[in-house]
Amino acid sequence: MQKTILIGSPIRQKPEILELFLISLRALKKKGYSIAYCFVDDNDDERSSHLLEQFRVEKGDPVNIFKVEPYESFVRDEVTHHWTNKIVWRVAAHKNRIIEYALANEFDYLFLVDSDLLLHPHTLVQLANSGKEIISEIFWTKWQPDMPELPQVWGCDHYTLYELAPGERLSPDHARLRQQEWLEKLRKPGVYRVGGLGACTLIARPVFERGVNFSPLYNLSFWGEDRHFCVRAIANGFELFVDTHFPAFHIYRVSDIPKAKEYLAENGINREDNLNNICHHLLHQAHQALVYYGTTDFYKHDLTAGLEYFAPETRSVIFQERVKCKNEIEQDFLMTYTEVSNMVPGSITSDSALVKAKVRNFGLHHNRNFMNEFEARIYFRKYNENEWLIESIDFSPEKNTSKPKKLLWWSQRTARPRGNRITLAMVVRNEANRYLHIVLDQAKSIVDEAVIIDDCSTDDTPDLIRETIKDDIPLRLICNKEPLFENNKSRLRQALWEETIKNRPDWILCLDADELFEDKAVNALRQMVNQEEFDYFSFRIYDFWDERHYREEPLWSAHLRYYILLVRYQANFNYTWNQNPLHCGRFPSNIALLPGIQSHLRLKHLGWMNPRDRLVKYLRYRRLDPDGIYGIKEQYESILDPFPRLVQWQE
């Protein structure tokens, strides 16, 4: 008899993401297995519930849907997912309910998969044929926008991205090297033992029969239900594995949807049952051909790489082009990379086809950076029943430009290895009786000069600034005649930027009047700016709730992210600004396009320590952003929580 697999998922999802998830489920191959589905419908959007019901009606396999009433909003924005304890353990309860259903109906396997994942068609069979009792398919996610992609599996503990023996201690350099090696291994197709996993996991029936589930272990403080499941599994004698042959795609942000659709197309998954398969095949082939054609890394040691996508006569021309560039490529005088976007099919006939795409080609040529953008037209010819090959590719500059765009500023980039000066940039308003004195006292030992805008203070803030800085460093104090802070913070930040760059600074350190670096930063910052490689540094910010503790909750996790605070000024870079009147950022919005790095130094944010200040901020956000358009409404409401979770600061 065929073995049975239950595909289960707790679902509270945006309809535009859920639709793609269900499409990928429809495309799963199931050779040798009998499939059924079990969903927990926890949606707060009726359109998502309708999609599940439509899936149930249309699908030939059995589909069971448990409908529950949502009771708490789940905030997911373009930065991260804001989990609360209630939501985490609610999801755990949903997963346990699916486990009970799998046991009651005697399924051989349960495949638990999150509803923001897209699966390769071969995923299910690959995992089921692995012979492992607990095995996940890998996927990679930028958990924060400025972070590298990381996997949903880990080596040990909470999220250590390598294996560590009991009692083993590693130096920071050794730990970074081991993590790099571990991540590189996971990029190679294979099956590997791991210490933790989740979100896309096939689990054999004996695991559940032993009592392994997602309920919280009372003596374990690890965050997330998957960690409690993994600890139970190991304690019951099971091992955890990850398969990396067919990585899934994680739609972590709404902005990931275009790439998600490309993933479906590249893996031959039709968005509609009767969608033209030829169209998907051509889009995939055109994408691959363009990337191979314009990325020299692919043929450093193989001049024929990617030529199989082209017609014989075209292959010869491309091969000769590569031969001419071979020496430059091997000596690293020429490094080029290609990105493809906005691919659309053109005309398709019985023996010819056209695909249009936008192409960005960038890299390094004889120590000069370049970037060109083109509109590409890829012409196909059908050579036999199943083979379409590219006859030619026409490139033209992007519309409305007379020549290809180039990042000319790169050739004029300035970066000195020593002697760099740091300029403090700060906006203040009524800070005389708060933390400004100690902040400036520290800052003047770090920076070489200061540019400060006083936004119409009604107290002694300007006098305090002059008295604190005295003649220790040059000071330019601008006192606004009309306040901007309340009504247009973006204009205020831009005004500060314009005042700061008037004297062409080397580096700009932008601090708020209630931010204080940890002590070791005083010497470290000076060393950080005297290098040529990076143009910005980002830092973790800790929200202090009293003098010795910072707040740590899902909605209060600034210290788990990195914020750009120190920037090298590039006079020829085209800076752009976020125009939000609130939460607009303290630097231009495209600053992260510069080469930068995360710093280990930490910053104390003192502005929440006083209960009166917290009340003032709460009322201000309620007044300026009542619907949470520019920030997170749930976070605003949590400001006055009388029992927040606090963690003691460790120097």
Image (cartoon, rainbow, N blue to C red):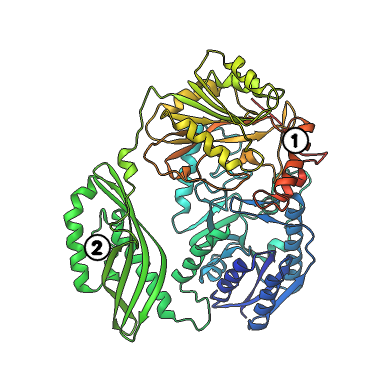
Q: Which mark is residue 646?
A: 1
Q: At 79% from the left edge and 67% from the top edge, which residue is drawn?
A: 68
Quadrant the C terminus occupies? top right
Question: Is 594 placed above or below 348 here?
Answer: above
Residue 324 screen position, x and y as percent: 16, 55
Q: Amino acid at mark 1?
A: Leu
Residue 328 screen position, x and y as percent: 20, 48
Q: At 57% from the left edge and 46% from the top edge, which residue is drawn?
A: 155
Q: Quadrant of residue 315 in the image?
A: bottom left
The residue labelled by disc 2 is 304
Residue 108 screen position, x and y as percent: 66, 71
Q: At 57% from the left edge and 68% from the top edge, which residue is drawn?
A: 128
Q: Which mark is residue 372?
A: none
Spatial CA distance of label 1 from label 2 is 59 Å
The reply to whether residue 476 is visible in this rendering is yes
Q: Is disc 1 placed on a helix, strand or loop?
A: strand
Q: Is disc 2 placed on a helix, strand or loop?
A: loop
Of residues 594 and 31, the one drawn nearer to the viewer in this rendering: 594
Label 2 crowd bin: few (<14), some (14–19), many (20+), radius 10 Å: some
Which residue is farthest top?
471
Q: Amino acid at mark 2?
A: Thr
Residue 58 screen position, x and y as percent: 64, 83
